[in-house]
Image (tube, coloured by chain):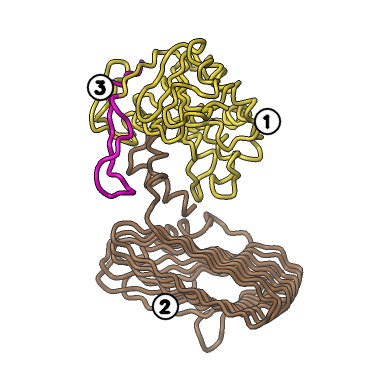
Amino acid sequence: MNDITKKLLSMISDISGEIKGAFNIREDGGCAGRQSTENVDIIPKVGQPGIDIIIKPNTKEKIYIPACVTKSNVDDLVYNDFYVGENSDVVIVAGCGVHTDGEEDSQHNGIHRFFISKNAKVRYEEKHVGIGEGTGKRIINPQTYIEMAENSYMEMDTVQIKGVDSTKRDSKAVLQANAKLVIKEKIMTHGEQYAETNFAVDLDGEDSGVDLISRSVARGTSKQMFRSVINGNTRCTGHSECDAIIMDKGVVSAIPELTANDIDAALIHEAAIGKIAGEQLIKLMTLGLTSEEAEAKIVEGFLK
Amino acid sequence: MLELKNISLSVEDEFTGNGQKEILRDVSLTIETGKLVVVTGPNGGGKSTMAKMIAGILKPNQGQILLDGEDVTDLDITQRATRGISFAFQQPVRFKGITVRDLINLASGREISDCEACGYLKEVGLCARDYIDREVNASLSGGEIKRIEIATVMARKTKLTIFDEPEAGIDLWSFNNLIDVFKNLRKEINGSMLIISHQERILDIADEIIVIADGKVMARGKKEEVLPELLREDCQYCVGGKGRRVVQ
């Protein structure tokens, strides 16, 4: 594992020193370390890049699957499939860091599929960062596909705060009876960056529910697009929320698409886009902060 | 000591679109160090505008504001805050993601201990454990956010603290405590306080009462001199509010 990978890992996860439990660290398209445990099997795929992560029923563990790109001119594509056994309760720390040192772009395209069995509980953390002095663009395009069986629960926390020039996130989920999915996304873009998020959720099982929450800040001349598609196909609840602060000449679009295919489907979308409220700045200034400090504090809190 | 000298403010008349509307006309007053002054008068009379002007949120067209002899008229909000002016809003601002702890830390200018934060919250009748890490967002009730606002300015401990209608939105239970909060705050920081209020019980703890109506100072004097007239049904001080008591 090289030093840049170590630095990126510290930014995208709480990894430091020896990792207890199952992990797979991907570095520039190769494997920089892998460990299975009694309950979590990590097996490389045959015929395509990527791994299968097989989690036995009743497992309670934290699993690390980070990916790092440490130089320019890397075009990494990976397929990771997670099979989560019944009654498991696991935390999966993924995340991706891209470092460029030259003129060529580097990108990581991670395609993650989750097959979550009955009564299983998953917390999935994904942090994206870009660093390096190179002029090459740092590109991360994650795709997430989630199948949730009855009574399962998944919470997905995604954060992209710094340095990623372009990102297109596609997330799709299908929920069976009583399954609950919560997705929290936090994005900050600056300079000329572009970030696009597409959520598509099918609520197929009775009393299934989804909550999509996006908070974002667009500064400079950056652009963001937030699309959320929720299809309520039975008695279910769906909520999506896009809350964005625009600064400088930042642009944010929010496009909701809710379809209730059943009389008992209850779907809500909320979107609020605007600059920082003047009264918030004034309040913090009356506490002694300058307007710049107040602005920074408001953004920090908003994305906390 | 805070001095307002011949303060006037006119704004464009929003309703007619032509002409200027006078909000404050030639207001002069003094708040002596260590004194508790309550400003009252009918709604729309210019009380909040004057308070915002002292905090630097609004600028006068004419006149001067002096704090301990220093002309602060051209200083911005931050500069006045660092000179020792605190302002508790009538309608406190809500923030997504900023917690009660964050606000109290910002107000006191340092990271304060749980115990200290607990003290401020307890004084406004909130259980610190339930509130310290809560976001100051729309999930708080009007009464809760108002109490947090008061706790925040208490943590600043400045030489001049302004409260704009602290009783608004506060339930009866915390209203009783509010009076104690002002008394304690006064004892603790030994600074001046300016409270805008319609409440007789708040007026009753004032050293001095100032009545502002129609943009002008209509009366000013010791509580004993001003309060009895204010309690009359046809209080002569209250132009525009005549026939209605401004004090509840």
* Residue A183 rendering spot, x and y as whole percentages: 57, 66
Question: Which residue in the protein does label 2 denote?
Answer: A76
| Residue B161 spot, x, y in % from top left | 44, 24
Q: Nearer the viewer, residue B197 or A79?
A: B197
- Asked if residue B8 is among those painted magenta in the image, a careful observer would answer yes
The colour of chain B is yellow
How many discs appear?
A: 3
For residue B71, the mark is 3
Q: Report the front residue among B223 and A90.
A: B223
Can you tell which of label 2 and label 3 is closer to the viewer? Answer: 3
Which chain letter matches label 2? A
Residue occupying image coordinates x 26% and y 22%: B6
Q: Which chain is brown?
A: A
**Farthest residue, direction bottom:** A47
What's drawn in magenta, residue-wise?
B1-26
Q: Is residue B174 visible?
A: yes
The chain containing the residue under callout 1 comes to B
Q: Which mark identifies residue B173?
A: 1
The amino acid sitting under disc 1 is Trp
Task: Give the residue type at disc 3.
Answer: Asp
Query: Quick one: SS at disc 2?
Result: strand
**Tag 1 or tag 3, which sits nearer the N-term?**
3
- Split into 4 quadrants, where in the image is the C terminus of chain B? top right
Residue type, label 2: Asp
Spatial separation of the CA atoms under disc 2 and disc 3: 64 Å
Q: State the CA–CA distance, disc 3 to disc 1.
A: 41 Å
Question: Is B156 placed above or below A184 here?
Answer: above
Q: Residue A244, position in %: x, y?
A: 43, 60
Foreground residue among B144 and A15: B144
Q: Main secondary structure of the magenta part?
A: strand
